Image (cartoon, rainbow, N blue to C red):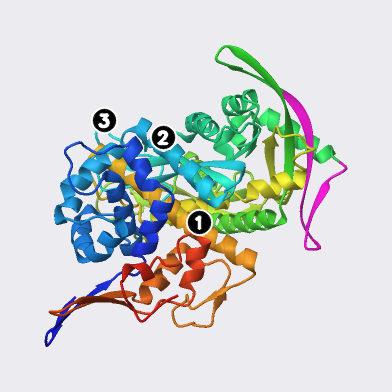
């Protein structure tokens, strides 16, 4: 913003979190990694692709917008701070739509992307001393308003965002624990099934880490025998839950019988309260991988959760009530606007379909009766008489009289509530039964990253680019933004915990509210509310720069992120504010 006061010209420029975000990218060497693996065209003038990337990431996280159309104007409005942070003069065309599109095209190359991911992870571990004890694998989807093509990446498939009406893009992700940092992400067309996507990502992550003997945790789609065999063959460990459809009903009944015969359940205690129970035994598995027979020992673990049992019981009661209500309205009597059921086969088919839809087959027993209405009328037209022949018309319809609950079947069904079967090949001496259960239940960490990827400020869904190479490129760029966001969040929480301190002033309207685990989005929003402004005062004789007062907690955040404390102060040659 430009203002004139006599011979003085004042130029105001909001800088907010821009220096922090760009400096974080530079600390990780993200600009250098992009230049190394994605490269920059030899004839390209101005900023390198690495500098474009870290500036574009700052725009995305600061403005909450991943569209290309607004980057050029935003960069030009903030050109003074960008020039000082990047150390280069800025041209308006540096962030043109064409240049950003060319950058996304370079991101679409899978080999270059994998090399870049590996480089970024190494930088994170070197700068912030991140540790890896286990890796979580899972998938999510994104969507967009795209046209379907036969070979396109946007395809109709299962949507985890409840938008099956739109084309999907599938993301297969790996998360490092306890660092809670994204390791690697593979992109696939939306119609791909999850089961075949675990092994390629596992092999890539294993090569990136170079650390054998890690535990890999995934949901029931990772329980495919070939996936478990690949992990066991490589000398690593897995932890997953078995889905019901993976084995025959006879096999499940054998396992249930073994569970019921177990008389030494292990109780799970937390803070003096019983949180669950479980039992386990071992069996030997054999599978063939690339012509090689693999054999290993696996622990079968039955886990009981009282919270899950209560939830399943309530859900069953709800389904039973809904089914009973619909059954009572299934057989209306004859009348205006009503269509009675007149065939027993039709009634039985509708009852079966209704019970199946509510998943209560065998738990409700409907009773019905056959109702006949007889009417005598004269044959032919005209008035009746004593000698005129008559005929009898019989109308039949079926009516439900009552719905009876099958108490024994319901009780038998409820006996299996709260029980889940999980498997692992990690020895019991290393991973106890309760530890295995707790480790699996912490899978929400990866789901939390998926939510951050789709929510503001990153906003992966929907995607506003149309070509496949730009869809892939933009998604991978946003995955880098996710890395910066999670790094801010985890490092600040880690520092506050180590110092046993809390931050205040982050919540609108609640200046005294303290937190020890602020989200990255809330931190960036609080910096934005501070309206940190760089002011240039220019006179005919000289030019001076001034900076508004910074939030009191900002130096603490900078120290946790290993950024220089003078990051904001060095933007000006003179200022009335100092750290």
Q: Of all residues shown, which one is farthest toward the right?
A: 263
Q: Position of residue 486 (x, y in %)?
A: 48, 55
Task: Kindly identify which residue carries mark 2.
Answer: 114
* Residue 425 in sight from this viewpoint: yes
Q: Residues within 10 Å of mark 2 (few under 14, many from 20)?
A: some
Task: Kindly identify which residue carries mark 3.
Answer: 150
Q: Which numbered mark, 3 or 2, is in the foreground of this view?
A: 2
Q: 155 or 13: which is nearer to us?
A: 13
Image quarter (top left, top right, bottom left or bottom right) of the C terminus: bottom left
In percent of the image, x 37 and y 76: which residue is there?
A: 529
Task: Kindly identify which residue carries mark 1.
Answer: 326
Q: Is residue 13 above or below residue 313?
A: below
- Residue 409's label in the rendered image is none
Q: Is residue 450 above or below residue 527?
A: above
Helix, strand or loop for the magenta stretch, by majority: strand
Helix, strand or loop at label 3? It is: loop
- Real-space Cα distance between discs 3 and 2? 26 Å
Horizontal placement of 543 versus 385: left or right?
Answer: left
């Amino acid at each position: 913003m430009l203002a004139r006061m006599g011979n003085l010209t004042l130029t105001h420029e909001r800088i907010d979190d821009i220096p922090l975000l760009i400096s974080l990218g530079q600390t990780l060497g993200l600009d250098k990694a992009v230049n190394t693996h994605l490269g920059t065209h030899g004839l390209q003038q101005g900023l390198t692709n690495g500098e474009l990337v870290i500036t574009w990431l700052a725009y995305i996280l600061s403005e909450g917008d991943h569209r290309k159309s607004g980057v050029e104007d935003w960069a030009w409005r903030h050109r003074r701070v960008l020039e000082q942070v990047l150390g280069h003069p800025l041209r308006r065309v540096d962030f043109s739509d064409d240049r950003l599109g060319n950058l996304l095209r370079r991101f679409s190359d899978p080999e270059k992307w994998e090399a870049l991911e590996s480089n970024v992870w190494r930088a994170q571990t070197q700068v912030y001393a991140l540790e890896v004890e286990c890796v979580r694998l899972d998938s999510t989807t994104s969507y967009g308003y795209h046209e379907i093509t036969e070979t396109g990446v946007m395809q109709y498939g299962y949507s985890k965002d409840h938008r099956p009406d739109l084309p999907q893009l599938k993301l297969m992700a790996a998360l490092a624990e306890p660092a809670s940092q994204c390791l690697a992400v593979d992109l696939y067309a939306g119609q791909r099934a999850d089961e075949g996507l675990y092994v390629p990502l596992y092999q890539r992550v294993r090569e990136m880490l170079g650390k054998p003997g890690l535990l890999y945790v995934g949901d029931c789609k990772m329980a495919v025998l070939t996936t478990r065999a690949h992990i066991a063959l490589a000398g690593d460990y897995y932890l997953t839950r078995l889905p019901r459809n993976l084995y025959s009903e006879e096999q499940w009944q054998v396992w249930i019988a073994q569970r019921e015969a177990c008389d030494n359940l292990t109780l799970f205690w937390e803070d003096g309260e019983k949180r669950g129970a479980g039992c386990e035994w071992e069996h030997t598995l054999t599978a063939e991988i690339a012509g090689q027979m693999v054999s290993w020992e696996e622990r079968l673990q039955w886990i009981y959760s009282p919270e899950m049992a209560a939830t399943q019981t309530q859900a069953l009661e709800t389904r039973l009530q809904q089914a009973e209500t619909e059954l009572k309205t299934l057989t209306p009597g004859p009348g205006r606007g009503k269509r009675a059921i007149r065939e027993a086969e039709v009634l039985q088919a509708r009852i079966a379909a209704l019970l199946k839809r509510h998943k209560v087959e065998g738990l409700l027993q409907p009773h019905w009766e056959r109702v006949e209405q007889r009417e005598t009328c004269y044959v032919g037209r005209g008035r009746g008489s004593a000698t005129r022949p008559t005929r009898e018309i019989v109308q039949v319809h079926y009516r439900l009289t009552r719905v009876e609950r099958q108490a024994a079947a319901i009780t038998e069904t409820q006996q299996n509530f709260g029980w889940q079967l999980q498997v692992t090949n990690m020895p019991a001496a290393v991973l106890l039964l309760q530890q295995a259960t707790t480790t699996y239940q912490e899978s929400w960490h990866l789901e939390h990253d998926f939510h951050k990827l789709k929510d503001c400020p990153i906003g992966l869904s929907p995607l506003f680019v149309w070509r496949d190479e730009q869809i892939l490129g933009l998604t991978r760029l946003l995955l880098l933004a996710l890395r910066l966001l999670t790094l801010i969040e985890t490092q600040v929480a880690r520092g506050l915990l180590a110092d046993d301190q809390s931050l205040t002033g982050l919540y609108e309207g609640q200046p005294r509210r303290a937190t020890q685990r602020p989200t990255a989005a809330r931190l960036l929003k609080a910096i934005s509310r501070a309206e940190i402004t760089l002011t240039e005062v220019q006179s005919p004789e000289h030019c001076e720069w001034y900076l508004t007062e910074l939030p009191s907690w900002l130096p603490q955040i900078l120290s946790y992120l290993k950024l220089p404390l003078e990051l904001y102060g060095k933007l000006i040659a003179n200022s009335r504010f100092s750290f």
